[in-house]
Image (spheres, grey):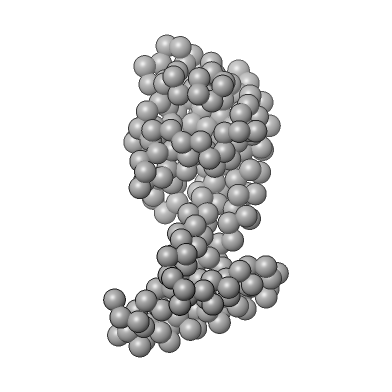
Amino acid sequence: MNQPADSAAMIAAISGALADPGPDDRELLASIVGVARSIFGAAASSIFLFDRDADELVFEAVSGEGEEFLVGTRFPAHRGIAGWVVDTGESMTVDDLADSPLFAQDLAKRTRYVPNSIMAAPVVHREEILGVIQVLDPHPQSRSSIADLDLLAAFAGQAGLALHGLVRSRAARRALDLGGAEFERLAEIVRVLAELGPAQRAGGLRLVDSLHEVLSGMVR
């Protein structure tokens, strides 16, 4: 790739990093699982990110049991209830996990909490499955309720927006890190503008987008 193309790619990375500041997305994910756990009267609620490159599910937010240590923990992407949800794109509620052939008890033991029941739904953004939201041991009135699965799907919709922002932000920052010394100044721009307030950041983003258009025109 020639130098203008490299520069255009890096400017696109800056735009992505500025558009989706990671800390805000992490706070939103934490809020979603906290509210979900409270609404369902559950022992725990969590959101997994589907890491396609590693083919793993990663705890991105946890409320309740395991919240002190589970964030960042990884599991195989295609095992257990969460794995089934990722593979099928369907929601699921199981009242008695001991009788479920899909339940991976060995993975549950690694979280230090083995639930009796679960509700789980795919986290989707623009038809792409980004992860799974789950609620462990919800109050009995929530079990097997279609209305409650619809409510969980609403939480999943919010989580999809936050996960999309988090993934985009991380990819953009990785691109900056891999850009080498010649892009250190651009990385510094990201750090400076990311600390600005929303209105000022929006103005900086418009400036970066304009530069992106100019460089993209040079490539054509």
In which quadrant of the rendered image does the C terminus lie?
bottom left
| Residue in front for this viewpoint, 215 or 2 | 2
Q: Residue furthest right?
A: 197
Tell me residue 7's x, y (percent): 41, 79
Residue at coordinates 36% horizontally, 16% vertically from top-left? Answer: 101
Tell me residue 85's x, y (percent): 40, 33
Q: Quadrant of residue 175?
A: bottom left
Is 135 placed above or below 125 here? above
Q: Is residue 172 visible?
A: no
Q: Is residue 61 visible?
A: yes
Q: Quadrant of residue 61?
A: top right
Tell me residue 10's x, y (percent): 44, 73
Residue at coordinates 67% horizontally, 68% vertically from top-left? Answer: 195
Q: Quadrant of residue 18?
A: bottom right
Q: Residue furthest front?
A: 181
| Residue in front for this viewpoint, 57 or 7 | 7
Quick check: 48 left or right of 62?
A: left
Q: Residue furthest top?
A: 99
Is 96 placed above or below 88 here? above
* Number of numbered markers: 0
Tell me residue 161's x, y (percent): 53, 53
Is 11 placed above or below 143 here? below
In which quadrant of the rendered image does the N terminus lie?
bottom left
Residue at coordinates 48% horizontally, 84% vertically from top-left? Answer: 211
Quick check: 30 left or right of 94?
A: right
Residue at coordinates 57% horizontally, 33% vertically from top-left? Answer: 70
